Amino acid sequence: MVIGTYLFEKVYTKYGQVSAKIIKITNKDKVVAMISADILKKLMQQNAGKDEEDIPMGPSLISTINAAGVNKFTELEVKGKVVNESVTLKQNDVNDDLELAVSSNGTVNLKKRGISSKFIIKEITEISVKN
Amino acid sequence: MKKSALKLSLFLFIFFIFSLSTTYFTYAAGQGDIKPLSYVSCTLDDGSRVDNASRITLQPKFTLLFDKNVVDMLVWENNRKCISLSADGNANVAIDVSKIDDTVDFDHRQQIFVTPSNALKPDTTYHIYISPNLTAKNGVATLGGTTGGQGITITFKTKVQEVPQDTNTASTTNQSNSQQSAGGAANTQSNQESTPVAVNSTVNENTTSAVVTPSTTSENTTNATVPSNSTSENTTKSAAVSNTTGESTTNSVSQNSNQVNASDIPKTEENKSAEDSSKQSGDIGKENSEDKTVSPSEVLMGKSDSEDSSVKWMYFVTGIIVISWVAVEVIFRIRRIKGRSNKPLV
């Protein structure tokens, strides 16, 4: 049973990364955290302010990175499921306006806060931190 | 055949009901009686305890061990702010608080790593303060539950820095140490500046020298001809790596103690935390390895150890099977007795 559980976790993690339901956060090519949509929803509830006019669709990018244990960076590269789809954000670009919107199918998209704004990156698979 | 099938069905039914009810009551008990978070120990890389220790290295890496998961993402933002380091006189010291996320390596979920951003002063008493607000993953258990709301203070003293007496020896050692460093590119610069006098490079690196000029901090400071209060410690870091990077590539070689801190944080990210020194006089670090029950299964099974818990689960399941079988046998015997007693006497 223990082996089965271990194998199941490994398979689930692999499947999650491929299907963009688990986001891998890396720092210098080393994985520092794996985040799923469930965790992001809980983070959003934790950080939700009472006076917010816009209903958030997910936690902010910066709070997610901090929760993963990263506080210092110069650049963030957010990669999507589509090959070669990525965006590089400087430290000054990353603020509370950038949020990780959780969709109903468990994938996560990067967008600017505000209902009408488009997705910057769809179905995020990896966030790479550069110091 | 029919009787055996009935017996087996009844056995499975009783087993299932018993298992469910046991699980339910166990969880109910767990939710109503959550054990508070406990501090276990504070150790260095070599495993030595820090509590009340003296002669601690000037560039230590502390590992704080607790009895519950304290690195979960939902509690990490709070927890990293609960750790602070101060010297005597409540002077706060900048530290990097880091973790190995439980999604990456589950084995380190109960550990928090603390590294001073700059080298510590020799022969100085420091205090690591852990706030009572430190929270476990369950979001309910806090350290204050075991410390009476006062937090924990771990006191230690750094080693006395010995001043080398031979100028030539120090400079030679400095050059050899420079060559041994891991950051090869920066060594060219450091080698050129390996003079007995404090150099004038402007890299912001660690130094504990008291003679360094305010505007410059040298990457290599050799104090062969120095006053007694300066250090003779070499830090040979790569110039491209600042002292606040996530990956520690520090390779500092002390002239006197020959301690080398190799890059040893492959999986963590560092969070700077310079907290307010609103600490109270809590308990000095104490070991509490007995109070570790966490989940409802641990309430039932006791301390969760990888080997013990699997054996205990076996006993538990076997026990349920035996009890269920006994119940089935008793039911069938009662039925048989009733059947005999209902038979009319001929």
Image (spheres, coloured by chain):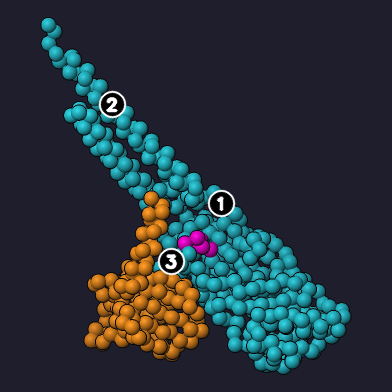
Chain colours: A orange, B cyan
Q: Are marks 1 and 3 in contact (CB under 8 Å)?
A: no
Which corner quadrant of the image does residue B219 belong to?
bottom right
SS for callout 2: helix
Residue closest to the eye, A51 or B274: B274
Disc 1 residue type (three-letter): Ser
SS for callout 3: loop
Mark 2 surroundings: few (<14), some (14-19) or many (≥20) residues within 10 A? some
Question: Residue B156: horizontal and vertical position, in percent?
Answer: 68, 65
Residue at position x 69%, y 87% in the image: B187
Disc 2 residue type (three-letter): Glu
Q: Chain of mark 2?
A: B
Say which label, 2 or 1, has the lower sequence index: 1
State the extent of the magenta-drawn residues as a range: B106-111
Q: What numbered label is drawn on residue B103?
A: 3
Circle 1 sits on which residue?
Answer: B289
Task: Count how many numbered circles sit on residues in the image.
Answer: 3
Circle 2 sits on which residue?
Answer: B329
Q: Classify B281 as above or below A75.
A: above
Determine whether, in the image, residue A115 is placed left or right of residue B253.
left
Disc 3 residue type (three-letter): Thr
Residue at position x 49%, y 45% in the image: B308
Residue at position x 24%, y 84% in the image: A115
Which corner quadrant of the image does residue B83 belong to?
bottom right
Which corner quadrant of the image does residue B202 belong to?
bottom right
Looking at the rendered structure, whether the residues under marks 3 and 2 are on a common chain is answered as yes
